[in-house]
Image: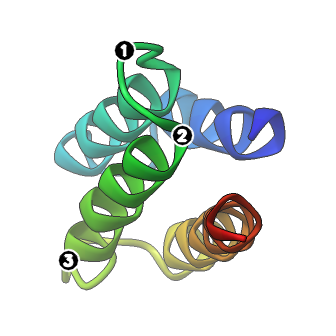
Amino acid sequence: MDVAIKLLDEIINDRTIPRNIRRVAEQAKQELLNENKPTELRVSAAIHLLDEVVNDPNMPLYGRTRIWNIVSILEKIRAQVEK
């Protein structure tokens, strides 16, 4: 999960990514860091947030690729937790 958080930080700190997308990345990061919820729920919430923003027309192509990469990492984590 540390890799996904690091990649989210890169999006959050990238000023070429629109503010609303960076805000969603921050929310997804906070979901992942929320220790009060089970891991599967935290990962699912973060994936849901990122899935909603990935189709934003203002999203640069490289930003969309980064988010797909993060979602892929999180889906692998969710699959491991579900076992």
* Residue that label 2 marks: 39
Instruction: Residue at 57% x, 70% y: name it.
Output: 71
Which one is closest to the eye, mark 2 or mark 3?
Answer: 2
User: What's the distance in space between the residues labelled 1 and 3, CA to CA?
Assistant: 30 Å
Q: Earlier in the sequence, mark 2 or mark 3?
A: 2
| Distance between mark 2 and mark 3 Cα atoms | 27 Å
The residue depicted at 70 percent of the width and 46 percent of the height is 4
Question: What number is the disc on residue 36?
Answer: 1
Q: CA distance from mark 1 to mark 2?
A: 9 Å
- SS at mark 1? loop
Q: Amino acid at mark 3?
A: Asp
- Identify which residue is drawn at 36% across, 14% down: 36
User: Height in image: 28 above or below 40?
Assistant: above
Horizontal and vertical percent position of residue 64: 49, 76
Mark 1 and mark 3 lie on one chain; the one further toward the N terminus is 1
Give me the residue at 45% from left, 35% from top.
38
Identify residue type, mark 2.
Answer: Thr
Circle 3 is placed at which residue position?
56
Question: Which quadrant, please, contains the N terminus?
Answer: top right
Which of the 4 image quadrants contains residue 76? Answer: bottom right
SS at circle 2: helix
Residue 65 picture location, percent across and down: 62, 79
Other residues around mark 3 within 10 Å, as few (<14) / some (14–19) / many (≥20): few
Where is residue 62? Give x, y as percent. 61, 74
Q: Tally the numbered discs.
A: 3
Direction front: furthest residue? 83
